[in-house]
Image (cartoon, grey):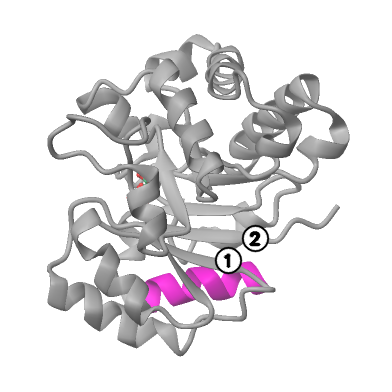
Amino acid sequence: MKRRPIIAGNWKMYKTKDDALAFIYAVNVKVPEKELVESVICAPAIFLRDLVKREGEELRIGAQTMHELDEGAYTGEISACMLKSYGVEYVVIGHSERRAYYNETDESVNKKVIQAVKNDITPILCVGESLDIREAGTTDQIVKDQVVKAYLNMNAEQALKTVVAYEPIWAIGTGKTATPEQANDTIKAIRNVLTELYSAEISEQIRILYGGSVKPNNVDELLAQSDIDGALVGGASLDPESFLALVNAAVK
Ligand code: PGA
């Protein structure tokens, strides 16, 4: 089964408005057709409106987080329908930095994934283990548990609208990448859980990305793996040339 690859940049808390717009102008005209690869930039919320307005046919814009409820007294938060009303099409949910610094739990991640899907926004659900867990040899168990909890109360039709990003925490921003085989093995384990939760037919259609120090010089070997359907990229998505190198690698 051929799944369309996704390269999603996660800008985190980097760039000013001018930097963000300069990036969009530089890459918009150069990203490959979206039938070949989905090219996505997940930007800080304050830039989303400007970026969506200027995105081209092929480049798509995503948010980095959102609230799990429709509306309410939640100062500083942004809802899925607000994102939708601006034309935002993707949202990163449960990034390890959000789990670690902003108390995002498996329960809130589950609610957010459902909320995104209900609002027609593609959630990029992040899961991944710490170094302790990797060294203790319990990675698959921990990651499977995160996946099961994230898909609670979701039917197959909703699950099909999700994307998973497997990001070992020890590989994020550290320059240490999981070996392509390690990444592929864990991603296969994730696909197996999705098969158990839904069916092989469904799990074969869900894109599962790898994230953690993906760079133009290691992306080829990662994407060559059987089950890695793209990448969620932090540092290497900030520079236009580097981002373009990654999306072009996904077309090969
Ligand atoms: P990195 O970040 O590519 O800088 O390691 C990945 C991520 O946090 O999604």
Which residue position is annotated with label 2?
A: 5
Image: 70 above or below 119:
above
| Front position in the image: 250 or 82 | 82
| Front position in the image: 143 or 54 | 54
Q: Overall secondary structure of the magenta stretch?
A: helix
- Residue 252, visible in the rendered structure: no
Which residue position is annotated with label 1?
A: 38
Examine the structure image and report whether residue 189 is included in the region drawn in magenta: no
Magenta segment boundaries in residue numbering = 241-252
Q: Quadrant of the C terminus?
A: bottom right
* Mark 2 residue type: Pro
Residue drawn at point x = 29 percent, y = 35 percent = 71
Mark 2 near mark 1, Cβ–Cβ under 8 Å?
yes
Residue drawn at point x = 29 percent, y = 78 percent = 23
Q: CA distance from mark 2 to mark 1?
A: 6 Å
Total count of labels: 2
Image: 145 above or below 151:
above
The numbered mark, 2 or 1, whose residue comes first in the sequence reads 2
